[in-house]
Amino acid sequence: MDWLSTIQQFGEGLIGPTAWYVVWTLIKILCIAIPIILCVAYLTYWERKMIGFMHVRRGPTRVGYRGLLQPFADVFKLLTKEVIVPANANRLLFVLAPVVTLMPALAAWAVMPFGPEMVLADVNAGLLYILAITSLGVYGVVVAGWSSNSKYALLGGLRAAAQVLSYELAIGFVLVTVLLVSGTLNLSGIVMSQDSGMFADKGVNFLSWNWLPLLPLFVVYVISAVAETNRHPFDVVEGESEIVAGPMVEYSGMGFALFFLGEYANMILLSALASIMFLGGWLPPVDYAPFTWIPGWLWLGLKTFVVVSMFVWFRATFPRYRYDQIMRLGWKVFIPLTGIWLVIVAIWMQTPLNIWN
């Protein structure tokens, strides 16, 4: 864009090319991080409103117009609460654990494309980077349980780690299958691979997206994403009837808030990844006006909103699973199913019926 080139030339002339590169990168990081943090805050508002609607209740109404300032009131309340550290806890790890839980969910957005050439770091191994950086979140849960010096927190952390790792394997197989049909680890390339084919040539883009030929894997991905984020009906880690409040039972104030924000940030991240992997990313559903008038980043946002609303819908609908049922579903159903489907797709691609040429 011409105005971006003008800004870049002005900045380089003002403070030098090297310093401007650092400043410009920080500006782009803030342009991504601030909207994501606001989306995380207002996802809590949307969840309470949506569940209230499904339960024939009102949800937040008092703070601001129709309760729109409720997320800011919640943040202010948590900021003013006393932070209590158990006497025998490992203070350094106790403080560090919530940060380790939240930061991977924010760092993963560095390679997420919001549109053609609208990405902070358009690396060729973007999908591998996301798999690597999101897997670090489990350390925050384990460290929180261990550093609290509490048996309840330790057991909750171990259960959370086992559940997250189990469903990460299923998600890994799903993403490997998407990689196989797309032929690239670049997230922008995965989106563009869904913009070709018989249906896309006729302008009906949504029938060329990966959700249709890979529908069983799309279903497995969504369910596994719910389980990996410890959301209902897979929230036995925080099930009050079973193990108090999981690994964060000893946390208060902003320490607890960071765990809370990490959960919602992961929901948004996995929903955006589902939109990129299966729902065409920034591509419009049909290649005709007025759909083509809407910018690509808004299409990605709308698709992410639909997927993340499914997390809330599940919470308001299904009863909680037992822990042994959760582990059985992951190890005995999803992992074999995704492995078999990966082999089927690989064989499919070697036949004349290959639709991904």
Image (cartoon, grey):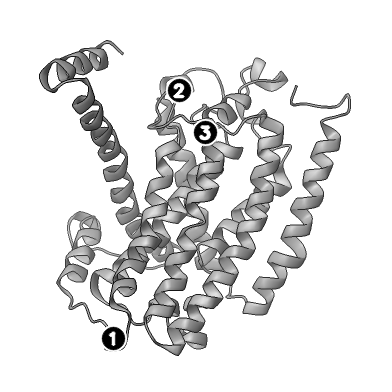
The amino acid sitting under disc 2 is Pro
Total numbered labels placed on residues in the image: 3
The answer for how far apart the CA atoms under marks 3 and 1 are is: 45 Å
Specify the label residue 116 is tagged with: 2
- In the drawing, does residue 63 fall left or right of residue 356? left
In the picture, residue 23 is in which quadrant?
Answer: top left
Q: Which residue is mark 1?
A: 86
Q: Spatial distance from mark 3 to mark 2, Cα to Cα?
A: 10 Å
Marks 1 and 3: in contact by CB < 8 Å? no
Marks 1/2: CA distance?
49 Å
Q: Is residue 211 left or right of residue 103?
A: right
Q: Residues within 10 Å of mark 3 (few under 14, many from 20)?
A: many
Q: Is residue 231 above or below residue 286?
A: below
Q: Which is more N-terminal, label 2 or label 3?
A: 2
Q: Nearer the viewer, mark 3 or mark 1?
A: 1
Disc 3 target residue: 281
Question: Residue 118: x and y, percent?
Answer: 39, 27
Q: Amino acid at mark 3?
A: Gly
* Disc ID at residue 52: none
**Marked residue nearer the N-terminal end (3 or 1):** 1
Give the class, few, some or many, for how many residues have Cα within 10 Å of label 1's Cα (few <14, many ≥20): some
Crowding at dot 2, Cα within 10 Å, few <14 / some 14-19 / many 20+, comes out as: some
Q: Residue at x 67, y 38 (%)?
A: 178
